[in-house]
Amino acid sequence: MPVALKAQTTKVLQLSIKDDIDPGMNRYIGLGLEAAENGNYDLVVIEMDTYGGLVTDAKDIVEKLLNFEKPVYVFINKDAASAGALISIACDSIYMAAGASIGAATVVMGQGEAAPDKYQSYMRSTMRSTAEEKGRDPAIAEAMVDERIEIEGITKAGEVITFTTSEAIKHGFCEGEVESIEDLLAKAGVKEYELDEFSIGAIEKVIAYFLNPVLSGVLIMIIIGGIWFELQSPGVGFPLLASLTAAVLYFIPYYLTGLAANWELILFFIGLVLIGIELVVIPGFGVLGITGAVLTVSSLVLVMLANDFFDFTYVPWEKIFIASTTTIGGMVGSVLLLFLGGVQLANTSFFQRVALSNVEKSSDGFTAKFRDISVLGLTGKAHTVLRPSGRVIIDNEVYDAYTRGEYILKDDEIVVISEEGTTLLVKKTATDA
């Protein structure tokens, strides 16, 4: 119902809900209410036009509205369906445009079918308690969810309530029909006012930019490609740095908007640890490596979806499809980047400077030598695993050796391609390469 306002100039902040109710919208409303509080606004007006969205985020928004100390009005410019109806009822006053509607709050699953009764029961309870809090008929609010409820003169069994503007006014779910927010303020008795429209700051715009699926795919490509390149060329450094930077840019926006949960981030890092153990500690690529890869890829997909610990009840199939294809596209892109761009990258002057790949040749004045007999060109076997350093055995003598990033298993045939001070630079023989 209308709330009495101050006689002096009233500061009004306008918010907008014109998209699905999701973690991003949840964060937007929270930021808007925070800005209204910090800016000493006297009134908040929400312009509403939505078909609904996630019940969990709608419930969070409702709690924010109920805890907000200043009055909040809602202007339903066209639709306030499902979660939008719940949020509207949580406001102090509801105004609707001609031809607008409010109701149809039955909970549906990601594929569009009605959710099981336990979810409907939760929504019924929430609608009822919110209506009671704002002095509206709780039975009508509950009947917006449950088609089994029959209210004489209003609805019959088998139909959920969806009010037109005139019906909402008649039954106490709308204070009046208006054409605009200015019209709303006039009918609410706000004569002298200063109206500001809330807009997100530069940081929030950057966060929204990084939530773009295309950019997410590019970041995934850098994450996976950087990790793989660093494993193949240990000590280079900048591929790993690029991967970590991309991971930060990928996860933080989803975390701040409420999509990425702590357990999803933990999955990602556990996956990386398992992959590292498989590659560094245990030769080959077995159970740990496969498990790590599955956890890592799964976490990249899950952070994009508003699931409740693998509960995808409210997640539409199209969002699952977008998240999956984005991740797969990033993985394919990283493979192409490694195969097509790896050679060119290794030959660039920047890589040569960073990787310190220059060889100190005797022709350039480097003459250190610690063996009486040269073993250059001789073959032998890996005495230990080389990843990339280890030991080799040549003519029953054991030598320290390393490779140019190549992974060599114990007993693999090797050939000496350079003598580097006290160590040998080796590679697999042609038969084992």
Image (tube, rainbow, N blue to C red):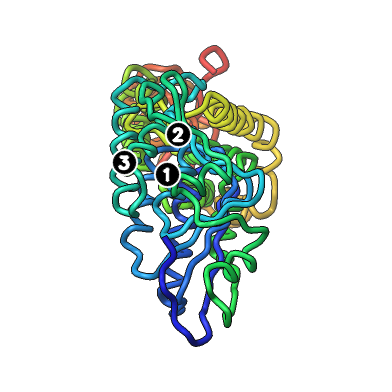
Q: Is residue 47 above or below residue 235?
A: below
Label 3 – label 1 distance at C-alpha: 10 Å
Left or right: residue 322 versus residue 243 is: right
Mark 2–mark 1 contact, CB under 8 Å?
Answer: yes
Q: Which kind of residue does numbered mark 3 sit on? A: Arg
Name the foreground residue: 307 vs 400: 307
Upstream in the sequence, badge 2 or badge 1?
Answer: 1
Q: Residue 86 carries which label?
A: 1
Left or right: residue 240 versus residue 331 is: left
| Residue 42 percent location from the top left of the image | 45, 76
Q: Is residue 363 above or below residue 226?
A: below
Residue reaching furthest top? 431
Q: Which mark is residue 105?
A: 2
Mark 3–mark 2 contact, CB under 8 Å?
Answer: no
| Residue 232 percent location from the top left of the image | 50, 35
Q: In this view, does 107 lie above or below 368?
A: above
Q: Residue 128 carries which label?
A: 3
Left or right: residue 213 versus residue 54 is: right
The residue under the point 61% across, 39% down is 213
Q: Which one is in front in this view, the residue at disc 3 or the one at disc 2?
A: 3
Label 3 – label 2 distance at C-alpha: 12 Å
Q: Helix, strand or loop at disc 1?
A: helix
Upstream in the sequence, badge 3 or badge 2?
Answer: 2
| Residue 9 percent location from the top left of the image | 53, 85
Q: Residue 213 carries which label?
A: none
Label 2 – label 1 distance at C-alpha: 8 Å
Name the foreground residue: 244 vs 248: 248
